[in-house]
Amino acid sequence: MIIILLGPPGAGKGTIAVEIKKKIDIPVISTGDILRNAIQDGTKLGQEAQDFVNSGKLVPDFLIMKIIENRIIQQDCNHGFIFDGFPRTIHQAQEFDSISHQLKKKIDQVFYFEASHEVIIERLSSRRVCSQCGMIYNLNYNPPRIQGKCDQCGGALIQRDDDQVDTIEKRLKVYQNDTLPLVHYYQGKKLLTTINADQDVQDRFKEVWEKLTELNLVGEN
Ligand code: AMP
């Protein structure tokens, strides 16, 4: 099964990806996480991507496609995967269409998380992530039990560089120009379901799960 989570930064795609994974054991592929890890580890990819990621710009398509091509042929992807943050341009989507065609796989559903500007800004500026395991928190809705520490692994919680207000605005502009056209692209392929992403996690997930059930992609529970 291939599921794509599409939407602006702060729409809660990452949180929903984790919820889906709890129920269906297929990996979440977050290009943002892969890039941040590469930057932290100082790999060649990390060095090439660093300036783009930190300034809120898109990493060039050829680098992203290399990441995707290498990741989806890993064994844990045999039964499918969830894309969080990919594709982000029409060109990436077209490239993935041709890769999946070659691999005889198909996209099952694209969920478009539509969120209002105020909600996005509020969510991103109060988002904290675990520097060790990547678990996502929100200081207002989903705070850690101990301030500054991850509930799961005890790692330090940090604010991403690109979650600073100036960079958030830049990322939203990039999203409007480069990524939003994908809504139309997948609508044309009859693969798109719109989710009201202003809702809390439970309600967002409920809508996603209902759709997956309706499509017979998952069982009832
Ligand atoms: P995210 O964690 O998905 O918000 O991604 C963080 C940053 O990584 C983005 O602002 C981009 O700089 C970069 N990035 C992640 N995914 C992609 C992608 N599919 N195409 C281009 N750049 C990406």
Image (spheres, rainbow, N blue to C red):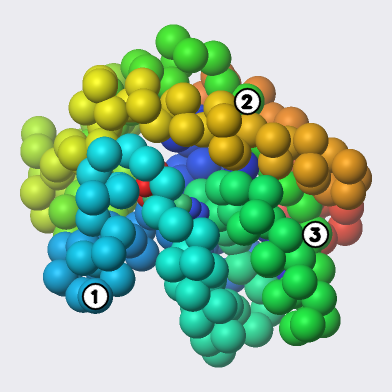
The residue identified by callout 2 is 114
**Pointer 1 or 2: first along the chain:** 1
Q: Which mark is residue 44?
A: 1
Question: What kind of residue is marked 3?
Answer: Asp
**In the image, 183: left or right of 143?**
right
Quadrant where the N terminus is found in the figure: bottom right
Residue named by callout 3:
108
Helix, strand or loop status at disc 1: helix
Q: Is residue 136 left or right of residue 54?
A: right
- The numbered mark, 3 or 1, whose residue comes first in the sequence reads 1
For the residues labelled 1 and 2, the Cα–Cα distance comes to 34 Å
Mark 1 or 2: in front is: 1
Q: Identify the mark nearer the N-term, 3 or 2.
A: 3
**Relative side of 58 to 197, left or right:** left
User: Compared to 75, does 65 lie above or below?
Assistant: above
Residue drawn at point x = 52 percent, y = 33 percent = 175
Q: Secondary structure at mark 3?
A: loop
Say which residue appears at 52% left-offset and 42% top-offset: 13
Task: Report how far apart the C-alphas of labels 3 and 2 lie in the structure.
Answer: 19 Å
Give the answer, above or below, for where 181 lies relative to 190. Answer: above
Side of 122 where 54 appears, left or right: left
